[in-house]
Amino acid sequence: MPSKTFLNLPEAKKQKIMDAALHEFSVRPVEHAKVSNIIKETGISRGAFYKYFTDITDLYQYFYDSIKLDAHQKLYDALTSTNGDIFAALDYFFEHLLEYFDSTKYKQYFKVMILGMNSFTEEKYMPGFSGGHQVQEHFKRMLNLETLKIDSDEEFTLFLAFLTDMMHDLLKRHFMEDHTVAETLQAYRMRSHWLQDGVKKRG
């Protein structure tokens, strides 16, 4: 988190630093971002930067927190409006997520973030069911489990991991292959249909 020194800066100076952060993190992922580029763009000294933030990762976390979509709340809202239907809720959630990523001034930032993911940053920054046992339990309580063929907590956890991996893969493809929101949403809905109805013909 930023220091009180940063938080007490005039709004214009804070915004200048945030604009520089947007530019830097829209060009390279956090592990390759450089304090020197922030300093050069803003005109602050290196000493001033370290009075505001402990390191470049600290700035990245603050920047991310300031613009991120509250994914967990969006999921909860979707589950409430769909009476616990996980597939209807995720359809709404994923469409909203794609539109948010694609239609803001942060599109290039999200592209760099998602395509530059490693195991640490994916767990920390990618939207989905991360957040630990407490988040998963709250999510589970909101579901209509009678519609799912899931018999144990372990199976439920694996199912959430499967859904998360599916959405993450589609987000990466969305940016890597420069798909439209409609194209990625269609790909998601096809996969969701496979899960709900299967691909094997009956009878």
Image (tube, rainbow, N blue to C red):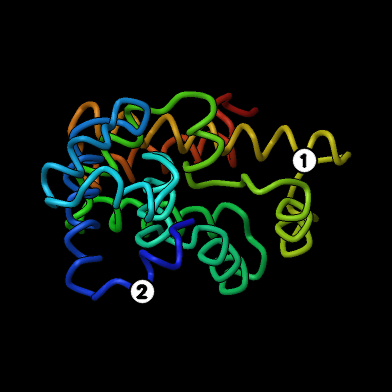
For the residue marked with disc 1, what is the amino acid?
Phe
**What is the x, y in percent for residue 80?**
62, 72
**What is the x, y in percent for residue 47?**
30, 46
Element carrying mark 1: helix
Which residue is nearer to you in this view: 128 or 48? 48
Q: Which mark is residue 156?
A: 1
The answer to whether 6 is drawn above or below residue 179 in the figure is below
Q: Which residue is mark 2?
A: 8
**What is the x, y in percent for residue 56?**
36, 39
Residue most toward the right? 152
**Which quarter of the figure has residue 52?**
bottom left
For the residue marked with disc 2, what is the amino acid?
Asn
**Residue at image coords 84%, 34%:** 154
The answer to whether 7 is drawn above or below residue 168 in the figure is below
For label 1, the crowd category at 10 Å Cα-Cα, with few meaning under 14, some 14 to 19 and many 20 or more, is some
**Residue at image coords 80%, 34%:** 155
Q: Quadrant of the C terminus?
A: top right
Which residue is nearer to you in this view: 126 or 191? 126
Give the total number of marks visible in the rendering. 2
Which residue is nearer to you in this view: 91 or 47? 47
Element carrying mark 2: loop
**Mark 1 to mark 2: distance in Å?**
46 Å
**Residue at image coords 51%, 65%:** 74
Give the mark, 1 or 2, whose residue is nearer the N terminus.
2
Task: Give the label, 1 or 2, closer to the camera.
Answer: 2
